[in-house]
Amino acid sequence: MGFKKRVKSLVTCVNFLLAQVFTIRMTTWLSLVVPLVYLWCRCKAEDELVSVVEIFRHGDRTPAFFYPNDPYQDPKYWNGLKEGDLTEKGSQQLYNLGQQFKDRYKDFLGNAYNPDEIIVMSTHMSRTENSAKSFMSGLYGGIEIPIKKETAVANQIITCLKFDYLYKRSELSDPDIVDINEKNKDLYQYLSNHTKLPVGGLFRASGVLDTLKIEQDAKLELPEWANIVMGDTMQQVSKTAAEFFCYTKEMQKLGLGSLMNHIIENFDNIISGKKEAKTLIFSLHDLNLICFLQSFKYPEIAQPGFASSIFFELKKSKTNGRYYVNTFYKPSVEQTPIPINVAGCDLDCDLDEFKNIFRDLRLSAGQWYSECYAFGLFDKLFPTKEH
């Protein structure tokens, strides 16, 4: 046998031996790890579910507004519905979400509705109230269930005057948004010319494109000019607008502070033995969900779809009594829940750490009203002298 053949034979032999060693090691490793994983899963499955909080966006709706020369302003195109109303499709989406919720938590919820154990809240908009009704119909059937409205807890964010001020100011003063608006000024002018609506910035452009998208999804033929801006342009504008919504701590405090305070207080009261509802349901808007995703430092901020949801599970460890929170996000009713890393705290996030993440964002209902509607008033009436 020549030298080259001997070397080739030796290499083949060595590769064979290494493969055998690897196989043995992998087999040994798996024989150790698989039982441990199985035991871990069994252990996790036995942990007690203490509370569930579901926060969802309303279902499919008619356009929130029509531009001045919109050809589809007549209610006849929307089965008699008005601007921003929940559609039949939207109602079905929330019914389906309610059924999914029932399937996931059937052992926790029980078969019959108990008003002492579940509280439902919505904003004052008809689309969120009707979405809540559809969700609960999917959960418990067609029984009448009270829906609470507490503005400080469940609110349409831009009704907070200070938030609206910060939101509008950011478009004028934030260097990144100013730069985006400068780059998109031709698009804004194009939209202004064809809609007869002044489109001066990112957020108004996003609203116009949202109207066009809803009309397109409703199988209505768009004007020829609109087809040019649909697709990639629309998606990019929508995503960028979402990325710059509720992106500061001050905005997040106003956008979710009172709701998160309500949730955490409910967790604490349950743990301390006070009689509290163990399931909280909130029917809100896409902007509410964006505020939560921003506070989580979620890496891919985009407009949440209709009937998208965020939910929290408070659990108690059977082994050491530790309380922890699991957080999930469903970008649409059809998608599987995505486990969420909340600002660096992964699944099984210790409750104390979870509370610490939101410590500086929490507001009581009274504080929320004061922040939203009395901001700057005291300083204007009683200015502080400079020294």
Image (tube, rainbow, N blue to C red):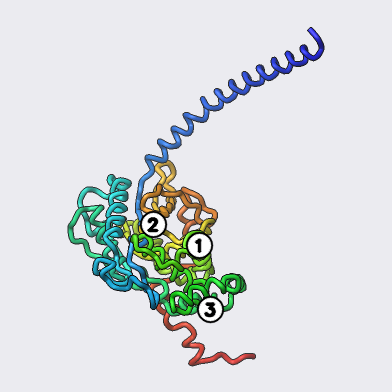
Instruction: Indicate which label's residue lies in the foreground, 3 or 1.
Output: 1
Q: Secondary structure at mark 1?
A: helix
**Real-space CA distance between mark 3 and mark 1, rounded to the nearest whole angstrom:** 20 Å
Measured from the top left, where is residue 378 in percent x and y? 48, 88
- The residue that mark 3 highlights is 169
Q: Secondary structure at mark 3?
A: helix
Q: Quadrant of the C terminus?
A: bottom right
Q: Residue at x 55, y 23 (%)?
A: 27
> The disc labelled 2 sits on which kind of residue?
Ser
Mark 2 or mark 3: whose residue is earlier in sequence: 3
Q: Residue at x 24, y 69 (%)?
A: 80
Measured from the top left, where is residue 282 in percent x and y? 34, 62
> The disc labelled 3 sits on which kind of residue?
Arg
Mark 3 or mark 1: whose residue is earlier in sequence: 3
41 sits to left or right of 138: right
Residue 45, placed above or below residue 77: above
Q: Which mark is residue 308?
A: 2
- The residue that mark 1 highlights is 239
Residue 12 lies in what quarter of the image? Answer: top right
